[in-house]
Image (cartoon, helix red, strand yellow):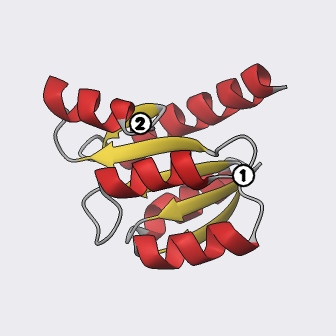
Amino acid sequence: MPVLLISRSPQLLVLLEAHGHTVRCVTDGQAAEALLQSTRISAVIADLTLPFTGIAFCRKISLESTGTPPYLIGLLPALTPDDISIALAAGAHLCLSSQQSLDDLVMSIDGALRSSVAVRH
C-alpha cells in the first residue's frame, strides 16, 4: 500500500518502512498536494500541526480526490474530543496522538492501514 507521510520525523518513516509499507515522505501540505496529484497514494499520515496540513488540508484531500480518497490518519499532539470531532468531520478517518511512543504510534498506524485495506477490498 503506497503511503504518504507528512512529517518531520525520520524515525517514523524508518519504522513504517520496517513494517513493510512503501512510504513517500514530505514535510508540508503543499508538497503533499503536488505528490497526490501525480502519484497513486492509498493512505496519508499527516502531522496536522505542520504548515498547510491542518483541517483545510483534510477537507481538500477528501473533497478533491478522484475516485476513493486516500485513507487519512491525522496526527495531533493532544487528542481533545473537539480536535478529534473537527478532524473526522473534515475527512480524516482516524486521529492518533503524536505524543505516544514511536513504537506504539507505528503499531496503531500499521493496524489501521491493514484494516483499511481489508475494508476497501
Relative to 78, does residue 116 appear above or below in the rendering?
Answer: above
Q: How many labels were placed on the picture?
A: 2
Relative to 74, does residue 15 appear above or below in the rendering?
Answer: below
Q: Residues within 10 Å of mark 1 (few under 14, many from 20)?
A: few
**At x 23% / y 45%, what residue is drawn?**
99
- The amino acid on which the numbered mark 1 sits, given as a three-letter code, is Thr
**At x 67% / y 47%, what residue is drawn?**
19
Q: Quadrant of the C terminus?
A: top right
**Residue 120 x, y percent position in the rendering:** 77, 27
Query: Which secondary structure, mark 2?
Result: helix
Place residue 78 in its image quadrant: top left
**At x 26% / y 46%, what residue is drawn?**
76
**Residue 28 x, y percent position in the rendering:** 40, 74
**At x 37% / y 31%, what residue is drawn?**
88
Relative to 108, does residue 1 appear above or below in the rendering?
Answer: below
Looking at the image, is mark 1 or mark 2 nearer the viewer? 1
**Is 32 placed left or right of 121 in the picture?**
left
Question: CB atoms at circles 1 and 2 under 8 Å apart?
Answer: no
Residue 104 bears which disc, if any?
Answer: 2
**Is 68 placed left or right of 54 in the picture?**
right
Query: Which secondary structure, mark 1?
Result: loop
Alpha carbon separation for disc pair 1 and 2: 32 Å
Residue 66 bears which disc, if any?
Answer: 1
**Residue 55 x, y percent position in the rendering:** 31, 50
**Is 32 placed left or right of 79 in the picture?**
right
Place residue 80 in its image quadrant: top left
For marks 1 and 2 on the same chain, the one whose residue lies earlier in the sequence: 1
* Residue 21 makes an appearance in the image: no
